[in-house]
Amino acid sequence: MKRLYLVLTLVLVLSFTFVSQAAWIDGTYEAWSDAGPKSIQSAKVFIEDGKIVAVVLREFTDKHVEKDWSTYPWPQAGEAARTLGLQFVKNQAAQADIVTGATHSSEGWIQAVERALVKASDTKPSNKYFDGVFLGRSETSSYGQYYKVVWVTLKDDKIVDYAVQRVLPDHTIQDPSVEVYGWPLEIARENYKEAAINSEPGYVDVITGATGLTHQSNHAVRDALDKARIK
């Protein structure tokens, strides 16, 4: 009787392990963490024979510029970028130890890997996008050589909040009170935000007097939506 109990226990453990691990489809899957005020993390997960075989981790600033670990002044973040990928492979899951001094980066990469594995699963949520806050970057304007970075908050496939900053060629942030083309930039931004929340995500109609702002903002929002996309 005791032997039968042990056999049944083993079967249950193996069954639970099988069920708890998603059936991952071979391929390469990239996903992004929620964006914070200063950074966003990405993970590219490589699946072969249904297993995680490699993970590449990257991190970007609030200006959507990739961090160079050879020059970045916070070595703990670089350590996390180098070591967490190996833990994901070893654990065959979005599980890794938080690196002291790089808590936000570590948690962001864990979330990004979680989302990548959702993309790799043979059963996916019905939503088109993950809920969360996603960072997007526009193309560079031919006038002024600036670009936009946006934070797009998504809930149930709808934009529920939006924030933006204009990054100048010297990587400083433009003061929104400065008038552009005779438009107070802050007013134009608020008009776009209201339209973005009430329109199809990524497709705001041209705002009179702010054509360039509308097009550039739409491009940045679509980039954020690409990062949020599940399938």
Image (cartoon, grey):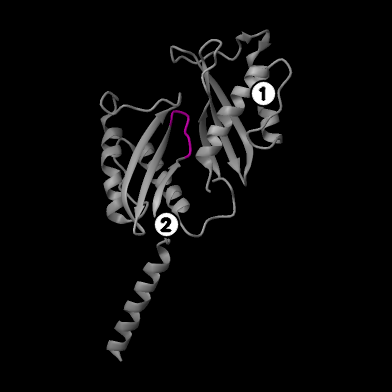
Name the residue furthest bottom. 1
Q: Is residue 36 magenta?
A: yes
Sequence order check, earlier mark of 2 and 1:
2
Q: Residue at x 52, y 41 (%)?
A: 228
Q: Is residue 199 visible?
A: yes
Residue 200 image offset from top left, x and y in percent:
68, 37
Dot 1: element = helix
The residue depicted at 26 percent of the width and 39 percent of the height is: 82
Residue type pointed to by label 2: Ile
Residue 100 seen anywhere in this rendered image of the structure? no
Name the amino acid, label 1. Glu
Vertical side of 55 occupied by 143: above or below: above
Q: Which mark is residue 190?
A: 1
Q: Is residue 3 above or below residue 128?
A: below
The magenta span reads 34-39
* SS majority, magenta: loop
Relative to 163, 192 lies left or right: right
Rendered image: mark on residue 25: 2
Q: Residue furthest right?
A: 208
**Does residue 5 appear to the left or right of 114 in the view shown?**
left
- Magenta run includes residue 75: no
Where is residue 155 shown, x and y percent of the image? Answer: 61, 44
Secondary structure under tag 2 reads loop
